[in-house]
Image (cartoon, rainbow, N blue to C red):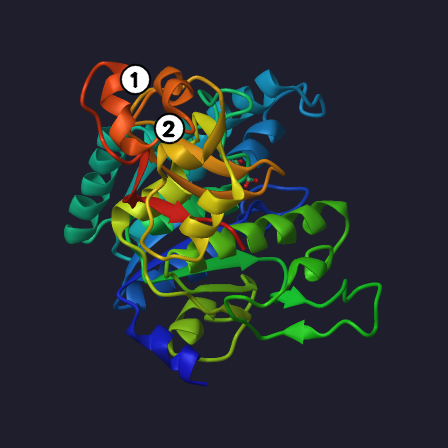
Amino acid sequence: MNERSELTKASRVVVKIGTRVVAEPEGGLNHEFLDQFARQIAELEPQIVVVTSGAVHLGRRALPLRHVDSVSLRQAAAAVGQPELMRHYAQTLADHGLVGAQILLTTEDMSDRSRYLRIRNTVEALLAEGVVPVINENDTVSVEGVTFEENDRLAAVVATTVQADLLIFLSDQPGLFTADPRVDSQAEFVPVVRPGDNISQYAGAAGGAESRGGMMKKIAAARTAMDCGIPVVIADGGEDDVLLRILAGEGLGTLFVAREPMAGRKQWIATVVEPAGEIVVDDGARRALVDKDGSSLLAVGIVAVDGNFQAGDVVTVVTAEGEEVARGLVNYSSEEVKQIQGAHSRQIPEILGHIGDEEVVHRDNMVLTAD
Ligand code: GLU
């Protein structure tokens, strides 16, 4: 398959390792997996960035209150488990002649454009030195409600941040099925998903409560990556030489074919930043944004504003029915948008008492997110 052979050209790959791949369900780390993984990285030509889970799982095992499910305990568990997780990664990579580096991230780090660029530069520097970055969420300091929640999304964000040309999810599932293969004998394996394919009805497939959530999150994360131009493979981490084989173009796992790549700044707007508010637009504005490729958002089409934001924040553009149309960097504060909503651009200086941008959100700083 053509799309598969494209993967052989990948020069920078983000690989996400799930807890159930790197650790035994009732036990500690899966050393055999880690060893095989490090060996493959050492053999591979492309640069590899690892996003790994497992800190909370490992840390919990060391805590007396391991069965209590509170936010603080999860954060405490991560504080105990992360150094252990990293120690094993560093040791196993070293066994194969590689140097590992730990990077712990929060959504706030990534939403701040200058910190985001700093992170990107650091990863660039590490990769240029031949070091393997090993990334996890900084669970101990993440604030409830604004976390990446799970590492699938973090991996998609990292893939866009480092401009990877492939994202691989190593999971305990062989990939995506049309239904849960364990309970439905009609379930069919889905080898390839193309942009525009409607796979939302498959999301409930593959596994019990936990893995169902897992597959849904993976599909959402895969969509983010493919929308940004990065193909994704979900494959079974237990397969022999899984990385080598995917990167040799073998039809392993489910391939999500990417759309045309998006500019880096737009990727950041679309995937990384938490929107600070909402701008509600009328039908005419919606049509201009979605159908007339190239239109900016003007004040005349705005009917309402929700939230408090400053000029330069990222906002969501929605319809009165609540459908998300776009995200973009806004040129005015929420107070100013309230004053100029419905007005023609030429009236803006008079209303605000100063000359401002003609566009409330300029097309170059906007990403369409409507289906
Ligand atoms: N950051 C969490 C950990 O290392 C994992 C989150 C997830 O399950 O994806 O334990």
Q: Real-space Cα distance between discs 1 and 2?
A: 9 Å
Mark earlier in primary sequence (1, 2): 2
Query: Residue, x 36% and y 73% (percent of image)?
Result: 7
Pinpoint residue 55: horizontal percent, then vertical percent.
Answer: 51, 34
Residue situated in front as seen by the camera: 237 or 324: 324
SS of the residue under disc 1: helix
Is residue 6 in view from this perspective?
A: yes
Residue situated in front as seen by the camera: 181 or 204: 204
Q: Quickly name the residue at label 1.
A: 351
| Residue type marked 1 | Ile
Q: Quickly name the residue at label 2.
A: 343
Q: Residue 15 — which label?
A: none
Task: Count the labels in the image.
Answer: 2
Query: Residue, x 66% and y 46% (percent of image)?
Result: 25
Q: Which quadrant is home to the C terminus? A: bottom right
Q: In the rendered view, would you say 138 is above or below 268?
A: above
Q: In the rendered view, would you say 314 is above or below 75?
A: below
Residue situated in front as seen by the camera: 86 or 243: 243
Query: Residue, x 63% and y 42% (percent of image)?
Result: 27
Pinpoint residue 110: horizontal percent, then vertical percent.
Answer: 34, 33
Query: Residue, x 23% and y 49% (percent of image)?
Result: 131
Pinpoint residue 130: horizontal percent, then vertical percent.
Answer: 19, 54
Tell me whether the residue at label 1 lies in contact with that at label 2, contact meaning CB atoms closer than 8 angstroms.
yes
Pinpoint residue 191: horizontal percent, then vertical percent.
Answer: 58, 75
Residue density around tag 1, few if under 14, some if 14–19, many if 20 or more, within 10 Å = few
Query: In the figure, residue 73 lies in which quadrant?
Result: top right
Residue density around tag 2, few if under 14, some if 14–19, many if 20 or more, within 10 Å = some
Is residue 51 in view from this perspective?
A: no
SS of the residue under disc 2: loop
Q: In the rendered view, would you say 289 is above or below 105?
A: below
- Left or right of 13 on screen, residue 140: right
| Residue type marked 2 | Ala
